[in-house]
Amino acid sequence: MNLPSRFIQNMKDLLGDAADDFFASYDKEQKGCLRVNTLRNFDLQKTFPDVSFEKVSWCEDTYRYPLSFKAGKTASHLAGAYYIQEASATFPVTALGISAGDRVLDLCAAPGGKSTQIAAALNGTGLLVSNEIVPSRANALSQNIERCGVKNAVVTCEDPRVLAKRFPCYFDKILVDAPCSGEGMFRKNPEAAEEWSDDSPSVCAARQFEILSSALGMLKEGGMLVYSTCTFSAAENEENVQKILNSYSDVKLSPVVTDIAQPTLYGVEASDEVIGGTVRIMPHLANGEGHFCTRFVKTDGESVRVKPLKAQKNPAFDKAFGKFCDAYLNVRPKADLFFGEYGYSAPEGCPDLDRLRVLRAGVQLGKLVKDRFEPSHSLALSLKAEEAKNTLLLREGSKEVLSYLSGETLPCDREGWVLVCAEGSPLGWGKASGGTLKNHLPKGLRINR
């Protein structure tokens, strides 16, 4: 692998004699990694009995797998039963220590691995606000939130400074997985090395400090903020942490306790407190790509009331949706937010979203077509198999599941709307009539075979 010469020298300066072991790790065999989505009822090993999975020590429900297993091309992946996520990238959410009912902000959330991990930890309680400033990346984030069946999330596309004005001292937990120079991903993604330049770390460090400053303003007193990057640069990591501590008197470090081996670092302009209170996952010491993580606690902050979302009413929608639920569901989600002909079920405790760029607010239930309710794909993915009265349960790798994913019709002995599932996780809707199931999987999600 061709690594930038300046990067090579930086790592030699940082690691000293250990640099040889570090660079040797670039030639080691790599594995994929996935995290089982506990919002689904999914048995990984039972579904893929011939695959050898290796548990990741620092994160529950996370497993490495051989690259011969094409994890991104299964029905279970499309159904959100698991999320493909680098092993080291799962550590920051573990360090955040999510509790039931927390209000959590994932400030730099795309493509969604950490947000969906937060959602799994919340398990349907509390509130998750997932933000991404880049529109195209925010769309990918929203799609992954939907795919994983997350019901209590709001996805925004805003500058952190805008959010800081709207949500002062509001969140219990905040994750800032900041945009960085990406040095920790050079081994896995050689293109990242090609995009790196000598001034990448300093440019990124300045931007990260601004993002952290906005995030700290949104953290409530006693709240916890985890800052993470996927880079080795001390300027973006320990030295940025030191700068925050020097700049904000109402913030202190909460050391992360872990058994992950730590490197000895040289030439870092930060205190022993900072170096000892942060975590580095290094490829030559732990089986993961490069990652950095630290944790702040807010010691002071004025309580500010944030305006709640006002529930809306739409009698025509409620009537049609009620008929649909009576006929096809064993649950009835609330419909309290409307955009045009579409109705949404907003998260409990959702704040007012006026004048914010919002891509997703809870679950899009469906729309009115004249006086009939037509369910959305989002509603299907938010359900559990047992919450639908009509289900078609398909097996991973079967002819039937491949037919459904290809947009084909299937034989079906039910009538009306049917929730189609792969290994118990929802794939989408079908509508049955006269022994045939018409496929309602969105065309953009269908596969060619």
Image (cartoon, rainbow, N blue to C red):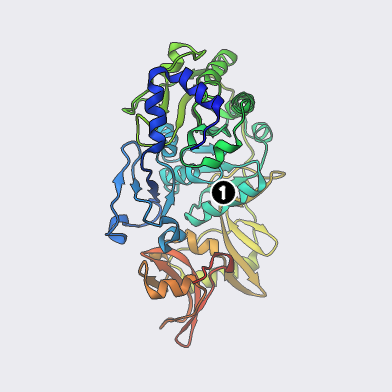
Q: Could you tell me residue 414's position as x and y percent? A: 43, 81
Query: Visible in this render: residue 282?
Result: no
According to the image, label 1 marks what residue? 141
- Residue 374 sits above or below residue 251 on the image: below
The residue drawn where x is 31% and y is 37% is 57
Classify 10 Å Cα crowding around label 1: few (below 14), some (14-19), many (20 and above): many
Along the viewing direction, whichever of 402 and 382 lies nearer the viewer: 402
The residue type indicated by label 1 comes to: Leu
- Residue 348 sits above or below residue 226 on the image: below
Q: SS of the residue at dot 1?
A: helix
The residue drawn where x is 47% and y is 84% is 436
Outermost right residue: 355
Q: Is residue 134 left or right of residue 236?
A: right
Along the viewing direction, whichever of 205 and 358 lies nearer the viewer: 205
Residue 68 figure quarter: bottom left
Q: Is residue 351 left or right of residue 436?
A: right
